[in-house]
Image (cartoon, helix red, strand yellow):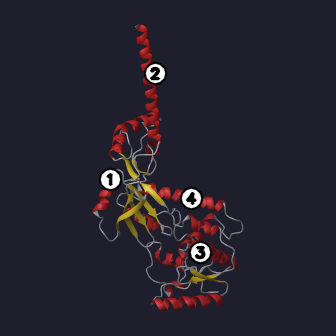
Amino acid sequence: MWRNIASNFLTLSIVLLIALAGGIAWGKREYSGPGASALAQCVQVAQGASLNAVSNQLAEQGAISSAYIFRAGVDYQGLAGQLKYGSYLVQPDASMEDIAGVITEGGPSTCGTEVIFRIGVRANSVVLRDIDPETGTYEERVKYDPAAEPEPETIASAIQQPDARLRIAMAEGVTSWQVVNGLQAAAFMGGEVASVPAEGSLAPDTYEVSAGDDRAALLAEMGRRQEVILNQEWEARPFGLPYASIEEALIMASIVEKETGVPDEREMVASVFVNRLESGMRLQTDPTVIYGVTGGEGILDRGLRRSELDTPTPYNTYQIDGLPPTPIANPGRAAIRAALNPVETDFVFFVADGSGGHAFARTLEEHNANVARWREIEAQRGENTESPVQTDG
């Protein structure tokens, strides 16, 4: 009898082991195989949330097929204590293993609501966007001008959300005064700014921030990034450029940034100014004169007057030789690279061509013909918005 009992027990044990092994294999397939949702989903991990709470939440929204298998898999991988707070976009058919990787790796939130304070050349704006999980792209919901309108309640509420993503987006070509002025208008930032950073010293970029972050600390980060960019591009420059220092290269980059908004033109515009420096010609560029008039505090919302072009100032490149004493804006990496890598041309003139770009010329005769064409375009439009750049020979 005991022999029969032992035999039955052994058989039962083997069956149980086989069933257990099968169950484990099935669980692994469930954990690593295609996920439960055919649609992209926004997965949120609350501050301090437990693995149990997160797994139940994922199961409720249909992102995973089993909260138990998810917890077991995360435990097995040793990730149970590594949940990262935030909102994350999970792709269609993502496995439980994929989702575990996303919510434990962390990094900037890739899903949910974001509020962007954009510091622009002509104006600032605040934009509220939400991601569409099905397309994985952000859709603009609300936009307003903080200088002219009160803050919409939808944006104020979004900023208070614990998982909201806050960003400061600094455009290429803004002045340091404009950056400081913009940050002071960003109500979700904190701290005071003691002084305006040196012109050209801040890197145009998008910066992740949190509510209450210190404005001065963000300015310091902007300055650090610009220093890194400038040093990298300076070290990679070719020989023979007419710059006595890295600061002069930054000045030239700021002029290139303000002269053209066409990416493919930057190296060409830089070549014109380099050719002028090398030949002893004056730069004769309107943006430097404008900077001398405004001091970088806002924009000159009109054309330059003849008296302003004729009045000597340190920034009036119609009146002075060489470069102005400082940059006239904060240039981006592309403009810095263009100033340090101009194409080889014999162009020494350029003027607007009516398409948003410029017409380049080698001689004063060619340039005057280009200016005449531009004047015709202005007349047809009923405009007279721009002084012709490089009019003197």
Frontmost of labels 3 and 4 is 3
Mark 3 lies on a secondary structure that is helix
Q: Which mark is residue 265?
A: 3
Q: Disc 3 versus disc 2: distance between alpha carbons?
A: 76 Å
For the N terminus, which image quadrant? top left
Give the structural element (helix, strand or loop) at label 1. Answer: loop
Label 3 – label 4 distance at C-alpha:
24 Å
Residue 374 in the image, given as x and y percentages of width and height: 54, 88
Q: Nearer the viewer, mark 4 or mark 1?
A: 1
Q: Which label was assigned to residue 227?
A: 4
- Across and down, in percent, residue 22 comes to 45, 31
- Specify the quadrant that holds the C terminus: bottom right
Label 4 SS = helix
Relative to 199, say whether 95 is above or below. Answer: above
Identify the residue shown where x is 38% and y is 67%: 125
- Amino acid type at image mark 3: Glu
Q: Is residue 305 visible?
A: yes
Residue 48 seen in the current view = no
Q: Disc number at residue 14?
A: 2
Whether residue 63 sits left or right of residue 336 in the image: it is left
Taking depth in this image into account, of 245 and 82 the one nearest to the observer is: 82
Q: Is residue 171 above or below residue 363?
A: above
Whichever of labels 2 and 1 marks the residue nearer the N terminus, that label is 2
Q: Are marks 2 and 1 in contact (CB under 8 Å)?
A: no
Q: Position of residue 117 (x, y in %)?
A: 40, 63
